[in-house]
Each structure stands twice: as structure tokens, then as C-alpha cells.
Amino acid sequence: MPKVSMTVNGKSASGDVEGRTLLVEFIRETLGLTGTHVGCDTSQCGACVVHVDGQAVKSCTMFAAEAEGAEVTTIEGMAGADGTLHPIQQAFQDHHGLQCGYCTPGMVMSAAALLADNPKPGEAEIRDYLEGNICRCTGYHNIVKAIMAASGQDVGRIAAE
Amino acid sequence: MYAFELERPSTLADAVAALSGGEAQPLSGGQTLIPTLKQRLASPGKLVSLTGIKELRGIRLDDAGQLAVGAATPHVQVAAQDHYPALAHLAANIGDPAVRNRGTIGGSLANNDPSACYPAAALGSGATIVTNTREIKADDYFTGLFDTALEEGEIITEVRFPVPRRAAYAKFEQPASRFALVGVFVAQYAQGVRVAVTGASEGGVFRWAEAEKALAADFSADALSGLALDGAGMIADLHGSGAYRAHLTGVMTRRAVAAAG
């Protein structure tokens, strides 16, 4: 089996993969990083979003071999070494941006990609960016609030729909 | 997923060689092909990934002033260029952000999904599809549902778009799939107007000749009044009948003309 090597959350990681091994399978099963979730497995739901070379991708729709040499960040790479939550994670907690939590890793990774490109997105921009992340609990409202808060914006004016 | 061999060459020449054995299929961004493999709607014995080939990526203006987009350029980069705003707008509304970071123009055109956006841009712009062996005019390239003029093992390397005076793409989105229920690309050139319609016909993307003629005489939404397409041969599914799509094509063409300004 071919070997693949990449950097995951700042550490070098390698392992044997088959051609068909998906990036999410490599992350979860080979590396044991099970924070990245598989929801739909059809690139619709976004629970599996990770960053590859700084860009949000659906890790269920990319082969592990294609991440050769890449810098990958998963949800485990977001909190500080001492366990301090990333500001986006903290905002999700503060604003109750999760209920069952299944979609949350993908939501946080997508939000981080959005804020890297657009540090102060408007509410409509956030909703638009999250098109590929599906949450079946929250109705998105508190997720949007959390992302507004994480980007240092006032969330008081977001009316519940 | 079933087992297959995956090769990831770093040059076009190596990719062409890897594809020559038969049973092999190119893999670009994989945003359509990987779900297709999971559903076993395709089962090639070997995939040749094009994502490691630098010469297939990038956007430039060629000597003729055309916007030349490398086939493995992801949608996010096409969305960020400002030489051809209507094309940027189209690319910015394909799928979702994570899909746009992986999906490529060459992959979309090679697949020729009847509801995909890029075929409308290529046909509506009279683009040239450049492969490792030849140049194909968009008018000769789209040959039917999921069917193109590409030969076995032929790889798209670049797509060259003549930049129009004005253009716009109007997409009526199917909200679950984010494909076009109907999408219309309208572009005005010195030589005339082109109108390409995706999502509507069972034969895939097509040019609406009557609308082109009317718009060449008068580039305004009003010039389209009285023009209508027949619902026969249009896609009919749970989202809409053929007659609905035919009607929607007229609506979206008027919206595209209005947006082109």
C-alpha cells in the first residue's frame, strides 16, 4: 500500500493508505482523531470539514493520498495546548451554538475559514458561507450569533427568526 | 468504496501516460466523481489525479486577450478574478465554499452534468476547450447528457473565454443540491449575442437561437417578450415539469439580460 505523509495540527503524520482511503478515514481511523465527523458521506452536510493548506474542504470527498505534503488542521488543532478553547469554540459555548454537537466540528472549521477571509462578516454573509454545513438542531440562529461574537461584533441586533 | 488504484502524477505528460492503459479515468477536484464512485455509478479500475499538476492550474490573459483558465483551477480562484465578472459570479455560486475550494472547471466541463453551471458559461461565451491533443470549440464540445467530444484518455488542460462587452448568469437554484434548476448565461460580443441554457434540456446545455437573434437586435429584456420554448424535451422531475422549466428559461433569460445591464 502506498504511504502518505502530511502535517496534521502541526505534527507530522504518515500512514499506509489505499487509493480509495478518504481523508476523513485517514484522520479518524489511522490517526485516531475522531473529532472530525462523518454525517452524510455525500459532501452535503459539512460535518467533516477540515482545513487543507488553509482552505475548508469536505474530508469525506477527498482522497487521503491527495493530501500528500499538505498542512491539515482538524477540530483537535483549534484549542490551545493547555485546553483553552479557540475563540470560535468559546463563542459557540457562550451563545449555545450547539445542541447535539454532531455538526459542530464542521461548523467551527467553516467559521474559522470564513473569518480568515472575512474578519467581520455580516449576518447574511455568515448564513451564505454556511450553505454547506447542515445543523438539524439549532435552526442556525445561535451558530450565526456565535460567529458574530467570535469576530468581535455585536450580536444583540440579530433578531430571532 | 470499492478498491481501485490511484495515481497522482506531477506532470501532464505523466498523466497522459497513466491514462493510456484503459480502465483509467482522470480525477480532478472529485466533488462529483467521488460521490459517484461511492454510489457505484462509476467503477474505473484506476484513477489518475490531476490535482498535483501545477501546469494545469492558474488564470491568465492570453495573447488574444482571452481569459485562459487552467483546467484544474478550483472555482474559488475563478470567483476571485476580475477580468470576467460574470464568470466570477457564476463560479462564486457553485455548490458551497468547501466544494468551491476543491471542484475544478475542467472537472465540471468533462462531466457535463445537464444542470451544472460551467457548461452554460463555456457555451455562452463561445469558449475554446483546450486538451492535451487539440482545441475544441464549445459549440462542438457538448454532445449530450454527461457526454462530450472528449476521447478516451484525453485531458482538458485549459479553457479560453473571449471576454464579452457585457454578460450575466442568472441561476434559479435547486436549494438542496445547489445545482441550477435552470441557469441562463447571456453574453454580448461585437459579433453577436450568445444565450446558453443549463438545467433545462434533457440533452444538456444548449443555445437558445431565437433569444440570441432578438437580443442582437435589441439587448433588452423587453426584446424577449413573446418568445417561448417548448416543454417537450425539457427535464421533468419532482422539482418541476418540462413546461415549468421552459417557462423558467424565459424568466431567467430576462433576468440575465437585466443583470448584464
Image (cartoon, coloured by chain):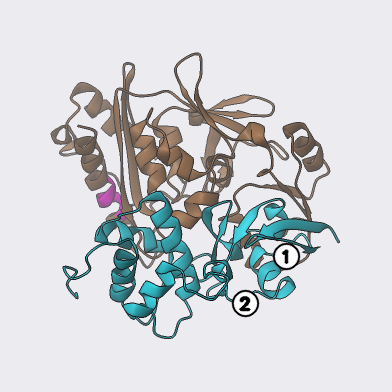
Quarter-of-image position of residue A114 = bottom left
- Kindly report the secondary structure that dominates the magenta region of the rendered protein: helix
Q: Is residue B247 magenta?
A: yes
Q: Is residue A34 positioned above or below B125 on the image?
A: below
What residue do we see at 24% from left, 44% from top?
B250
Q: Is residue B211 positioned above or below B114 on the image?
A: above
Amino acid type at mark 1: Thr
Q: Which residues are magenta?
A: B245-249
Dot 2: element: loop
Q: Label 1, on which residue?
A: A21
* Pointer 2 or 1: first along the chain: 1
What residue do we see at 69% from left, 42% from top?
B52
> Can you tell which mark lies on residue B56?
none
Question: Who is closer to the viewer here, B71 or B155?
Answer: B71
Residue A116 % position (x, y): 43, 53
Q: Which chain is brown?
A: B
Residue A25 % position (x, y): 68, 70
On screen, residue B86 versus residue B132, left or right, reads left
Q: Which chain is cyan?
A: A
